[in-house]
Amino acid sequence: MTTTTPATRYETVIGLETHVQLLTERKMFCDCSAAYADAPPNTHVCPVCMALPGVLPVMNRKAVEFTIMTGLALNCEIPPFAKFDRKNYPYPDLLKGYQISQFDMPSTQNGWVEVQVEGEEPRRVGITRAHLEEDTARLTHKEGADGESYSLIDMNRSGVPLMEVVTDPDMRSAEEAREYLLKLRQILRYMGVSNANMEEGNFRCDANISLRPVGSAEYGAKVEIKNMNSFSAVYNAIQYEVRRQTEELDAGRVIAQETRGWVEDVNEAFGSDFAKGSTVSQRSKEGAHDYRYFPEPDLPPLTVDLSYVEKIRAALPELPDAKRARFQSEFGLSLYDANLLVETRAKAAFFEEAVAAIEDPTDAGRLRFARLIANWMIGDFTRLLNANETELADSRVTPKRLYAMISLIEQGTITGASAKSVFEEVFRTGGDPAAIVKDLGLEQIGGSDEISQIVDKVIEANPKPVADYRAGKQEAVKFLVGMSMRETKGRANPATLTEILKQKLEA
Ligand SMILES: [Zn+2]
């Protein structure tokens, strides 16, 4: 039994390669529609993406623009020249026998993105490059009645624009790798360049993992993991692989440079923590030379004007980190709350629209309302969206309605307790909060006369707690306040009610 933990003996080194399908209308080198998700097999095809002889590719400019947008968002250099290359490998999903990709002159390179694991300092992950290529066809492996296996090919995906984002080996834990992927997905979605949905297969990640003794400057043998189809799969696969490599190194064995596949529910080699799956050796890793890259002769090199790049930069939306920082400084929100509000562009836009509706002209009033809007969005609104499995975009609550309801609380028309019911009704019907308050009879009881009558009734009906309180048992008042609030159906101001109750008890 050793007391040294793996974390203190070895350093984990992780680099990620993420393939991102771009949301262009057309495929990368032909006019076929790239929106094939619900199409019957082999209906979005033409001679170019079926790789028939004698056809020529024509570059999709929108895909280049999306790649440059991504490069700029990831703080990359945009070189003035880029080119396409042929990456040769024989596999049935690759109809031409080669993939058009970018090898030594990619469209973007040398960037970084900041990621932060909760409870740790933010760290920069280097972006080696984001380059452009094309997707492959899809194979489905089947077994016939005679037990013989065969494969079906669907060429709809063949030639769909694909961007590969490659990081430097800068991540040090599964948590950090997950944060990086979440950040990348968020940025891509903000810009609308991809759906970036792992489960739908338009955001696919491979991980390179190695271990080295702490303090060592050299990298260990790199293992590439494929077939991870969800964020949890990436996280679990990295955890598993770190554990496996640690045990191999501890046993004095050499880590083989290879490609391994993530397979869920295979074994429980490392106990229940790792019962979710394991990595399985697939093949020894090929080096770059095995692909016999050479320049694509059918496409001209890309010349990228500085003015074109600056035009794209100027049109970029405000990105999540900048938005979060602005929400913090402009509205005094915490890092945590601001992060939740900028999670999606739609959420941030909702918040900003609600804030724009604030009528209070004072700075203090504006800040108070902004905080209340944030609280309602993060609290009740999110809870109702989750419970009803609804997206913000499909919700009936509008920013103005949310602000109107908060105004009713601030004006004293309704209590905080009633507001919860009012908001649920706004959520359900999309109705006007003021009208809902009238319909449900939820106006706050204003006059102390009305509260007084209710309190009298409660005192009369509960002689025991009343006697207890008068005998010095202070906490008995809580029960009486609760009974009175219930009697008012939450329509009384709790502070006013408590005050009146105490006066009567002490009279
Ligand atoms: Zn086509």
Image (spheres, rainbow, N blue to C red):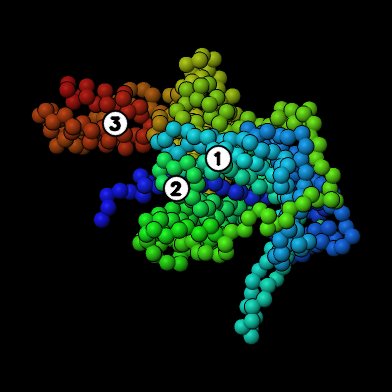
Q: Residue at x 64, y 74 (%)?
A: 142
Q: Residue at x 57, y 29 (%)?
A: 323
> Where does residue 316 sit, x and y in percent of width and height?
68, 32
Q: Quadrant of ligand 1?
A: bottom right
Residue furthest to the top: 362
- For the residues marked 3 and 1, what is the alpha-carbon distance in whole angstroms? 54 Å
Badge 3 or badge 1: first in the primary sequence? 1
Q: Amino acid at mark 2?
A: Arg
The label shown at residue 454 is 3
Q: In what element is the residue under mark 1?
A: helix
- For the residues marked 3 and 2, what is the alpha-carbon distance in whole angstroms? 73 Å
Residue pointed to by mark 2: 212
> Where does residue 208 sit, x and y in percent of width and height?
54, 51
Q: Quadrant of residue 461?
A: top left
Q: Amino acid at mark 3?
A: Ile
Q: Quadrant of residue 40?
A: bottom right
Mark 3 and mark 2 in contact? Answer it, CB < 8 Å: no
Mark 3 and mark 1 in contact? Answer it, CB < 8 Å: no
Q: From the viewer's perspective, tell me whether residue 24 is left or right of residue 345.
A: right
